[in-house]
C-alpha cells in the first residue's frame, strides 16, 4: 500500500512543477485525496458494499470537488491537476499514467439499462495509457481514446481517437496524427497547433477566389468573342 501511495505521489510531482514535496501533495492536493479515496471506494464496490461505496464517494466529491464513481476502473499513476469539476462515470476505464485537468467529463451517452432490463452496459469512454486531457474537455460515449492521445482544452470528443493523435474543437477533429510520449501540459504539444475551423475557412476562401477568377476569365472570353466578327460558314452541297 505504501509503495502504491509513493508511486502516485511521485507521478504527481513529476507532472506538476508547482509540487515541491511529498508532504505538500499529501496535505494540499485534492486530487491525491480523491484518488486515494477512490481506491477505497472501488475496493468496497467490488466486494458488494455498493451503498457504502457510493456514500463515501459523495463525501469525497463534496470535500475535493472531484466526482469519481466507485465502479470506474483506474490504472496506476493517475493524475488530476487542479481537479475541480472533474467527473468520471461508472463504466469509464482509465489506463496507466493518464492525466486529466480541471473540468473534464468522462460521460456516458448510451442508455443505462439494456433492452432486457439488465444493467452493466458499457456507457463511458476508455482512456488507454499515457492519454492527456485538457481542461474543460468532454469525452462522451463508450469508445476508446488510444495510447498517448492528446485532447485539447474544451474539446467535445464523440468518436474514437487514434494512438498518438491530437484532437481539438467541437466536435473534436484530428489536427496532428502523431505525438511523442513526452508529457505536455493541458494536452497541447509545443509548436504551432492548427485550428481545424480556421483551416477549413482558408480552404473555402481559396476555392471561392478560384471560382471568381474563372468567372472573370469566362466573361472575358465571351466579351472578346462578341467583338470579333463571326467567320462565314461554308455549307456543303450535301447539306
Image (tube, rainbow, N blue to C red):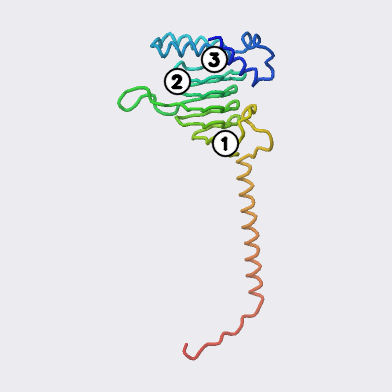
- Report x, y in % for residue 123: 43, 26
Labelled disc at residue 165: 1
Labelled disc at residue 26: none
Of the two numbered discs 3 and 2 on the same chain, state the one appearing first in sequence. Answer: 3
Return the residue at label 3: 35
Return the residue at label 2: 90
Query: Dots 1 and 2: beta carbons under 8 Å?
Result: no
Mark 3 or mark 2, whichever is nearer to me: 3
Q: Residue at x 63, y 12 (%)?
A: 25
- Report x, y in % for residue 53: 44, 11
Q: Residue at x 45, y 12 (%)?
A: 43
Secondary structure beneath label 3: helix
Q: Is residue 211 above or below residue 227?
A: above
The answer to whether residue 188 is left or right of residue 56 is right
Q: Residue at x 66, y 10 (%)?
A: 24
Label 3, label 2: how far apart the Cα atoms are: 15 Å
Residue 37 versus residue 4: which sits nearer the camera? 4
Secondary structure beneath label 1: loop
Query: Dots 1 and 3: beta carbons under 8 Å?
Result: no
Q: Residue at x 50, y 17 (%)?
A: 68
Of the two numbered discs 1 and 3 on the same chain, state the one appearing first in sequence. Answer: 3
Of the two numbered discs 1 and 2 on the same chain, state the one appearing first in sequence. Answer: 2
Label 1, label 3: how far apart the Cα atoms are: 27 Å
Amino acid at each position: 500500500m505504501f509503495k502504491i501511495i509513493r508511486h502516485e505521489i511521485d507521478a504527481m510531482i513529476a507532472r506538476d512543477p508547482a509540487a515541491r514535496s511529498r508532504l505538500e501533495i499529501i496535505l494540499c492536493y485534492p486530487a491525491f485525496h480523491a484518488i486515494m479515496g477512490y481506491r477505497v471506494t472501488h475496493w468496497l464496490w467490488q466486494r458488494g458494499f455498493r451503498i457504502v461505496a457510493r456514500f463515501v464517494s459523495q463525501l469525497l466529491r463534496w470535500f475535493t470537488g472531484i466526482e469519481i464513481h466507485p465502479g470506474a476502473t483506474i490504472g496506476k499513476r493517475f493524475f488530476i491537476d487542479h481537479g475541480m469539476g472533474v467527473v468520471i462515470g461508472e463504466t469509464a476505464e482509465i489506463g496507466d499514467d493518464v492525466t486529466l485537468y480541471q473540468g473534464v467529463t468522462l460521460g456516458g451517452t448510451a442508455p443505462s439499462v439494456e433492452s432486457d432490463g439488465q444493467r452493466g452496459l458499457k456507457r463511458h469512454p476508455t482512456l488507454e495509457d499515457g492519454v492527456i486531457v485538457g481542461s474543460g474537455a468532454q469525452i462522451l460515449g463508450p469508445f476508446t481514446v488510444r495510447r498517448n492521445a492528446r485532447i485539447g482544452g474544451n474539446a467535445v470528443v464523440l468518436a474514437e481517437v487514434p494512438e498518438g493523435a491530437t484532437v481539438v474543437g467541437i466536435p473534436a477533429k484530428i489536427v496532428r496524427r502523431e505525438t511523442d510520449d513526452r508529457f505536455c501540459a493541458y494536452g497541447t504539444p509545443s509548436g504551432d497547433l492548427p485550428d481545424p475551423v480556421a483551416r477549413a475557412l482558408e480552404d473555402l476562401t481559396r476555392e471561392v477566389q478560384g471560382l471568381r477568377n474563372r468567372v472573370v476569365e469566362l466573361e472575358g472570353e465571351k466579351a472578346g468573342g462578341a467583338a470579333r466578327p463571326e467567320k462565314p460558314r461554308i455549307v456543303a452541297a450535301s447539306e
